[in-house]
Image (tube, grey):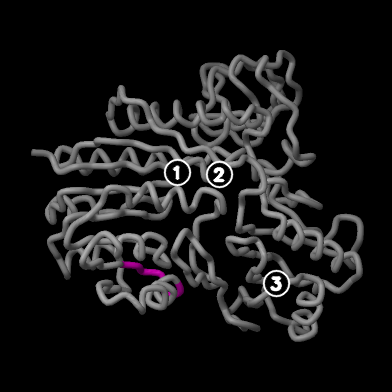
Amino acid sequence: MDSFTVRVEKLVYGGEGLAYHGGKPVFVSFVLPGEVVDVFPIEESRKFIRALPAQVKEAAGERIAADCPYFGRCGGCHYQHLPYERQLEVKRDILHETLRRLGKIERTEEIALHASPPWHYRNRVQLKLAPHPVAADRLQVGFHRAGSRTLCGIEQCPISSPKLNQLISVLNRLSAEGALPLSLRAAEALADDRDHTLWLTLAAPQLDFDRAALAERLRTELDGLLSLQSVETSTERTETDGLGWIYYQVGAERLRVSHASFFQINRHLLPVLVERVTQNLEGKVALDLYAGVGLFTRALARKFARVVAVESSTAAAADLAANVADLAGVETRASSVLDFLRQSPEKSDLALLDPPRCGLGRGVAEALNELAPPRLLYLSCDPSTLARDLARLAPHYRLVGLELFDLFPQTFHIETLARLDRAA
């Protein structure tokens, strides 16, 4: 399909601008409302076209120059061409519109916004590795290109912490020296709250390289590397050199986080998030569902006589058990949330929900409606699944408050805390 020209109407969830061509919606990356843009399509179906900008013919007055040299090529960020204050407004508007369109939820009250420092906030990075396009004996380090599975090589990432940028520099240097195994395809790292220590996971189809020598070289080049894990993706075999985790301090709580465990990525807003989630809570029993490594569990234990924390991931459940082992009033369950609610129904004063992007999953909202805790707190990373789940919880629950935490500046991602009370 040939390129064509469109006028962008608005930004939508996913980081794209919405336009129309021949009566068909067109979703375009890296544009702003009101702009006239020449675009080239990268995907077309009967219902929509997805495109990338070729040339901005009429730019919006609010457009700014991006701070990252890879913006527009790298697919990791979406809003660097928009001032940070406007990013927050756009996300709030998208949240309002998504809840109204998908959940039939009309809100006139203001959504509370919690801003983040817009740069160097990430404590976790997932890097891709691939053969270098011009040097056969080297690897390229980077992220997927926008709208593609090919690699955009990088030397830095301005939304990642200084420690993670040190890692990117080390990997590039080792690659240039021929010291990085050519079979490596991914590198993931988590840095601690002080940005001093980290764990690193390397993945390859086959662990066909000298792992001891590579570990020694990495520890020499990268200070604070406490744990190195190698994953053979063809067999899912893992080998770990070091602790297998790092410790992460959030406010008064110290948490163990292992290589395969999920953990929130914004190193600046985590204490604020925990404080807001647990503010003004008290009671006898709280359920911490989708508890992860226990980010909220320990804080809840300060407010409730008993906390039951439920987590299905094997790695996260092990971290969770270790992180609350000193608390007499906390019980952990290595179980899916649905199985727990069906098999171990327990009256509680509060249920805290922090599900993955897919939301509560089939049957969970209905089980909560039946269990009927008087208060629900739902922390969501996807407005679409949040809207769906809030609709499923109604009319048993009424929405009494919304807060938007910008855990992912420069990207389209939205973290929302919804407060719900049992309907009379």
Indicate whether 28 appears above or below 119: above
Cβ atoms under marks 3 and 1 closer than 8 Å? no
Q: Where is residue 54 in the image (x, y as percent from the top left)?
A: 75, 26
- The magenta-colored residue range is 310-315
- For residue 106, side relative to residue 114 (left or right): left
Separation (CA) of disc 3 from disc 1: 30 Å
User: First in sequence: mark 1 or mark 2?
Assistant: 2
Say which element carries label 3.
loop
Residue type at the position of mark 3: Gly
Q: Name the residue under label 2.
A: 408
Residue denoted by label 1: 415
| Quarter of the view holding residue 417 | top left
Q: What residue type is labelled 2?
A: Phe
The image shows residue 234, relative to residue 399, as above or below, that is: below
Mark 1 or mark 3, which is nearer the start of the sequence? Answer: 3
Q: Is residue 208 above or below residue 200?
A: below
Report the front residue among 127 and 3.
Answer: 127
Disc 1 marks a residue whose amino acid type is Glu
Q: In which quarter of the image is the N terminus?
A: top right
Measure how far apart labels 2 and 3 are at the Cα level: 25 Å
Q: In which quarter of the image is residue 395?
A: top left
- Please state which of the two labelled residues, at mark 3 or mark 1, is closer to the viewer: 3
Residue identifier under label 3: 224
